[in-house]
Amino acid sequence: MTVRIRAHHLLCMLTYVGKGYTGAFTANYDKIVERLGAGEDMLLVAGPDDICTPLLADKDEHCFGQSVIERDESAEKAVEELLGRPIAPGERLVLDAGKLAELRAAFRTGEIRPACTGCEWHDLCTAIAEGNFPNTRLVIERKLPCP
C-alpha cells in the first residue's frame, strides 16, 4: 500500500508525538507513522491526505483552506531544495533512517520550516526539535541499500 501525504505533513510527521485534533485523528496518525516506519512509500498529493481523513466529514475543516494550501506549497519548496529533487504531487517518496535524520536536522535548524509560520503546533514542534525529537512516533530503523 501507499500512504497519500500532502507536503506540509512531511514536516509534521517529524515531530509527531501523539498529539492532535481529536482521538480519532491521533489514532489514525499513529497507524500512518507505523506504516511509514515499516517501509511503505508515500505518494505526494495536493489537498487532504490520509492524515486528514478523520477530519474530512466537515467540509469547512481547515484541511481545505487556502492557508493550508499555501503551507503545502511552502513545505514542498523547502523539502525539494533540501532533497535536490522535485516533490510535486504525483511524486513517490520512501523514507529510510538516513533521510529521516536529514529531514529532522534541517527541521531543527529551521531550514525547512518556513511552512510552519503561523501554525498552531509551532511551539510544540519547536520544543520537540530543540530536545532532539524525544518520544516521536515515526521511527525507521533500516537504511535503504546504496544504488
Image (tube, helix red, strand yellow):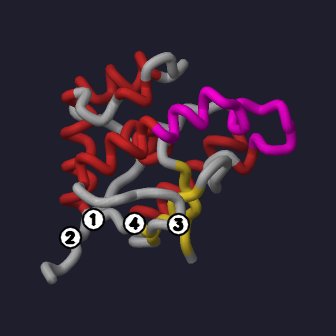
Residue located beneath label 2 in the image: 143
Q: Where residue 77 sits: x, y (%)? A: 37, 43
In the image, residue 12 sits, relative to residue 96, either above or below, namely: above
User: Nearer the observer, disc 3 or disc 4?
Assistant: 3
Q: Is residue 16 visible?
A: no
Q: How many marks?
A: 4
Amino acid residing under circle 2: Lys
Residue at 55 percent of width and 33 percent of height: 70
Q: Earlier in the sequence, mark 1 or mark 3?
A: 3
Q: Earlier in the sequence, mark 2 or mark 4?
A: 4
SS for callout 4: strand
Amino acid residing under circle 3: Gly
Residue at 19 percent of width and 59 percent of height: 98
SS for callout 1: loop
Contact between labelled residues 2 and 1, with CB atoms less than 8 Å apart: yes
Q: Earlier in the sequence, mark 1 or mark 2?
A: 1
Quarter occupied by residue 112: top left
Direction bottom: furthest residue = 147
Residue located beneath label 3 in the image: 90
65 relative to 131 in the view: left or right: right
Q: Where residue 120 sits: x, y (%)? A: 54, 19
Mark 4 surroundings: few (<14), some (14-19) or many (≥20) residues within 10 A: some
User: Nearer the observer, disc 2 or disc 3?
Assistant: 3
